[in-house]
Image: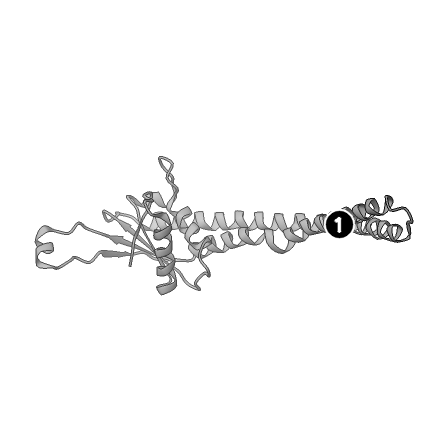
Amino acid sequence: MMAVRHGKRPELARALEAAHEQLEHDGSIEIELQSLDRLLGDRDGVESGADYLAGVLESARRLPAGLVVRVVLPLRPRTAEEGVAAFRKHCRARAEVSWREAMAVRRTGLRQLTPSMLAAFVAGAVAAGASALAESAGSSLVVPLLYAVAGLCLISAWVILWMPVEEVLFDWRPKAHVAEGYDLLARASVEIVERKPVRPRAIQGGARRAPRRVPVSR
């Protein structure tokens, strides 16, 4: 499995693709941090670990039913339960905020749908009337003008009606997907992995020490 070193992005696209492959393979995301508190706090302009994990889930093709978050640290923390509990609380809060934003977009579209339908109906009626007048008009100078008015009214009716329809059907879904990702992180199983440096003797002998995993209660 490939660990994505958080805060270093020399090849962001390849690292994100590798994270997606790992997510599809075994339903896990591995992130390497300098300390456990980096899961929540951002320092020196570097995003928090929670936001990085949510970004991986947001760009994934599909979300797994269950998720394992594997946090690789240079040293084993004395207390990991408090940090993991704070991480879950943070993800639940972000999920609620994203879901409220999604519902706000959808309800705004629903509120605007009725007046937009009325305005589109009026524009369509004007377009029909202008088209009928163009067919009955005898002057060749008036006919192009009436057809132009009819075309503009039809385009206006489409634009007026499409904007709230787009909000109701599509615009709220990205924020809802973000909320699903944070909710999945809040329910994820978190593993704290201590990765120790490889000793020179182990390198010569071809042996590599496996990382120590610190179990964390869910």
- Image quarter where the C terminus lies is bottom left
What colour scheme governs how the chains and residues are painted in the rendered image of this protein? one colour
Q: Secondary structure at mark 1?
A: helix
Q: Residue at x 72, y 48 (%)?
A: 160
Please state which amino acid type lies under the numbered disc 1: Ala
User: How many marks on residues?
Assistant: 1
Q: Choose between 206 and 160: the one closer to the eye.
A: 160
Residue labelled with disc 1: 157
Specify few, some or many for label 1: CA neighbours under 10 Å numbering under 14, 14-19, or 20 or more: many
Left or right: 166 with respect to 208? right
Q: Which residue is outermost to the front?
A: 140
Q: Choose between 124 and 79: the one closer to the eye.
A: 124
Q: Choose between 30 and 159: the one closer to the eye.
A: 159
Query: In the image, residue 66 lies at what x, y percent?
Result: 41, 63
Q: Residue at x 9, y 51 (%)?
A: 200
Q: Which residue is outermost to the top?
A: 44
Q: Residue at x 45, y 54 (%)?
A: 59
- Image quarter where the N terminus lies is bottom left
Query: In the image, residue 99 lies at what x, y percent?
Result: 55, 51
Vertical comparison of 144 with 61: above or below: above
Image-quadrant location for residue 24:
bottom left
Q: Residue at x 22, y 52 (%)?
A: 195
Image-quadrant location for residue 41:
top left
Query: In the image, residue 34 lies at what x, y percent?
Result: 28, 43
Left or right: 125 with respect to 170? right
Left or right: 115 with respect to 172? right
